[in-house]
Image (spheres, helix red, strand yellow):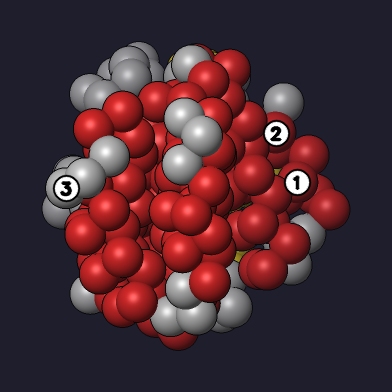
């Protein structure tokens, strides 16, 4: 099965601290695979937003694959090739896209509360710095949309400081704040689809959604 794996720079596992060998070398777990404990952990395309890291690799899994929420686990795996399109610039672009999605959620919250002038101000924002300032100021005067506005402020701040995972996290929770768990799931799907499209993930890798 073909899937994906985020690693720290130098092919280092973000939690295990394991340094993966070069492409094509099989790594086999000791003992039965268990989520967050043993085994080779990887991502389906839909799982990517939960595991962002410095390097993204396509990985081949071997043996019976266990499917868990937001990840999969197998007895063995080997790195195939690095996804070169995942760069710091791409991560920044992703974080910015998520920040603007959070802005859109705040605009929806304002319009539902009939705060059209405030909504129009957010829509007019042309930069993330302008968005961060406007959301911070509006949050002081509009209590019924305060949470959504503070999320817009924080999402913009995270994107500006290069913290793309947190920008994505805020975007998903801003959607949940408005419309509940279904909206949260839809926002995470939008994020995974953005990554798949922007990174031009392979057809075989896209099949790892199952």
Dividing the picture into quarters, in which one does residue 10 lie? bottom left
> Distance from label 1 to label 2 (Cα)?
6 Å
Q: Secondary structure at mark 1?
A: helix
Please tell me whether residue 21 is drawn above or below residue 67 in the rendered image. below
| Tag shown at residue 197 | none
* Mark 2, secondary structure of its residue: helix
Q: Are marks 1 and 2 in contact (CB under 8 Å)?
A: yes
Mark sitting on residue 140: 3
Q: Which residue is mark 2?
A: 209
Residue 208 in sight in this render: yes
- Please rate how many residues cluster around mark 2, counting C-alpha atoms within 10 Å: few if below 14, some from 14 to 19, many from 20: few
Q: Position of residue 74 (x, y in %)?
A: 48, 28
The vertical placement of 181 against 150, above or below, is above
Left or right of 125 in this view: 11:
left
Q: Nearer the viewer, residue 78 or 163?
A: 163
The residue to which callout 1 is attached is 206
Query: Does any portion of residue 53 appear in the rendered image?
Result: no
């Amino acid at each position: 099965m073909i899937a994906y794996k985020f690693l720290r720079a130098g092919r280092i596992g973000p939690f295990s601290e394991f340094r993966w060998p070069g492409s094509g070398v099989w790594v086999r777990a000791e003992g039965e695979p268990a989520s967050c404990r043993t085994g080779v952990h990887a991502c389906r395309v839909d799982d990517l937003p939960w595991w962002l890291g410095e390097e993204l690799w396509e990985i081949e899994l071997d043996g019976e694959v266990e499917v868990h929420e937001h990840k999969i686990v197998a007895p063995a795996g080997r790195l195939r090739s690095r996804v070169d399109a995942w760069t710091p610039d791409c991560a920044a672009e992703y974080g910015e896209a998520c920040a603007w999605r959070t802005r859109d959620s705040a605009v929806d919250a304002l319009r539902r509360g009939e705060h059209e002038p405030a909504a129009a101000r957010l829509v007019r924002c042309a930069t993330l710095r302008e968005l961060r300032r406007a959301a911070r100021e509006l949050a002081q005067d509009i209590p019924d949309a305060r949470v959504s506005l503070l999320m817009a402020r924080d999402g913009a701040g995270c994107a500006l400081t290069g913290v793309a995972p947190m920008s994505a996290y805020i975007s998903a929770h801003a959607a949940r704040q408005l419309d509940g768990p279904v909206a949260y799931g839809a926002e995470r799907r939008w994020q995974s689809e953005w990554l798949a499209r922007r990174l031009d993930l392979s057809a075989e890798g896209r099949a790892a959604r199952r």
